[in-house]
Image (spheres, helix red, strand yellow):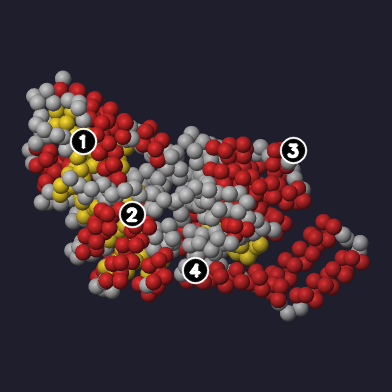
Amino acid sequence: MGLLDTIESPADLKALSLPELRELADEIRVLLIEKVSATGGHLGPNLGVVELTMALHYVFDSPEEPIIFDTSHQSYVHKILTGRGALFDTLRQKGGLSGYTCRAESEHDWTESSHASAALSYADGLSKAKRLAGLGHQNVVAVVGDGALTGGMCWEALNNIADGDRNVVIVVNDNGRSYSPTIGGFANNLTHLRSQLAAIRIQPGYDEVMESGKRTLKSMGWVGERTFEALHALKEGVKYQVLPTEMFPELGMKYVGPVEGHDLKALTNALNYAHNYDGPIIIHVVTEKGHGFAPAVNNRADQMHSTGVIDPVTGEALTASAPGWTSVFSEELLRAAHERDDIVALTAAMAGPTGLTPFAEKFPERFFDVGIAEQHAVTSAAGMALGGLHPVVAIYSTFLNRGFDQLLMDVGLIEQPVTLVLDRSGVTGSDGASHNGVWDLALTSIVPGIRVAAPRDPARLREEFREAIAVDDGPTVVRFPKGSVGEDIDALERLPGGVDVLARPAGEASESELDVLIVAVGSFAEQAVEVARRSEGSDVRVTVVDPRWVVPVNPELLDLAAAADMVVVYEDGVVRGGIGSALGEAMSLAGLDTPLRHLAFPDVFPPHGSRGQILEEYGLDAQSAFDSVHQWAGELGD
């Protein structure tokens, strides 16, 4: 039985010696590589924080002293140390362990923060609550990455934390990157600080001091672990003598670091100091993403930030990846950029995941990574548009939530030609509630003058993206889902107003038959056509149309709705404020009384699970859609 089998809570960790802690760290890495290789997940970030997470739980008293992980995709080690190691076979599976902190799983999980830059604000609020409850002596710990510190919300929180004397411990997990290498002036400063950690070995006199120390310790008969601890203390003493540093000198906050993030002794020394310090303090920890697993460390793209199923030895993917929606967009953006000098591209620290890396390599002067700062990205794009450019802002759908005010007031209000490309729209699957992109249609549809496209296939993505960047009098949005893209779904006919007819019943309807119009949004077109196919020969005659541009409502849809017995809007979003709502409002204004039904997500946060499982759970797979359409038609016929 290994040490890992004895760990059911942080209390068990505190009973271990330093050599045992190091042995446990090795066991945790083995577990992570084995389990995450089988399920997929955030491998690199968690390998990088093994020792740091152990030291945090060794020093602080969770859950009384909350440990909040910013983004929390790096909370796997935290889950192991708080009694969930046996559940890792279910990681990111439906009904299994979440890939982020989850309040329903453990009292040690205070938040479900999986959008970056929020942890410091949580910590600020929690520390204020503790002060008012008479528990101000307890610490609140926030673990925030250098990438997350490029987000403005962190700086707003820092401004408040530094102004008080509350016991907030800010642990900066500095590995030089988020998804991508951290950028900007702050990143440059961190690089300078990080370099000083390496520089201690070349300080004048350092080697001589160390050799002298070794001789002295040897003459005293100190060997083994005692020698290691003494030499480490000597090393730390030299370091702090020759390397006085600060991270945020203007804020006046106590700073300790940089600390070697894979040295348990150095970590516990620094964190013990923070635990006993009265007031806010920053502990700057330098870690290596993917530490201990060569395939991750050597992966130059993202150091295995997030993986699918992989070989646990080589790190090679075990499932073939089909061409994806993102790659189709990436190729079309490059074509457009070769044709138009005014096309520029922006992203928020996610050039690779959003398909902008090829653009950045070909047109580096026209590519802008603004860090984890979606709000800034959208308004900066508006400024570029004011300067005569046509910006393309590529972000995940779920992260548009953070830039909505800027889209509404900084772009929409002044009618600037900015194109937002929303990757991972709709259900994303295993990342769960915070990463599902089911809100973008409801959000974007209320911006006056906006145009929103939902391509159903690769050909339409290319076509609608080209149409979007041709617009010069307001914002446009092109949204598409996560994963592989299927075959093109050719239209039977394109109506004069641009609506594509994908399926229609044969022959004339009898008096006993009902005509149902399905308005299919985006990738749901394939399932809608399947519903029409299954309906052949029944008393329900199904016509399927793809509006292509779903906002504003195309007047042709009103003509089609007027001729139908029932309209069903089938969309990969939420019922409230979605395309069904918009069409219903338009039908009401036009005086149409055709019954309207919705196939969309109810008022929920869809949980983690595969895309197919989630769609089935909420009645949005093809079979469920068929059953619903025929049930509604039967009720209408009665």
Farthest residue, direction bottom: 204
Q: Earlier in the sequence, mark 4 or mark 2?
A: 4
Q: Earlier in the sequence, mark 3 or mark 1?
A: 3
User: What amino acid type is highlighted by mark number 3?
Assistant: Met
Q: Nearer the viewer, residue 556 or 210?
A: 556
Residue 422 image label: 2
Residue 564 visible in the snapshot:
yes
Residue 1 image label: 3
Residue 377 visible in the snapshot:
no
User: What amino acid type is highlighted by mark number 2?
Assistant: Leu
Q: Earlier in the sequence, mark 2 or mark 3?
A: 3
Mark 2–mark 3 CB contact (< 8 Å): no
Which residue is found at the position 47% from the left and 36% from the top? 94
Which residue is found at the position 24% from the left and 56% from the top? 464
Graded by Cα atoms within 10 Å as few (under 14), some (14 to 19) or many (20 or more), the crowding at tag 2 reads many
User: What amino acid type is highlighted by mark number 1?
Assistant: Val
Q: Earlier in the sequence, mark 3 or mark 4?
A: 3
- Residue named by callout 4: 186
Q: Nearer the viewer, residue 136 or 218?
A: 218
Secondary structure of residue under mark 2: strand
Q: Nearer the viewer, residue 180 or 498?
A: 498
When asked about the image quadrant of residue 638, the answer is: top left
- Residue named by callout 1: 568
Q: Nearer the viewer, mark 4 or mark 2?
A: 2
User: What amino acid type is highlighted by mark number 4?
Assistant: Phe
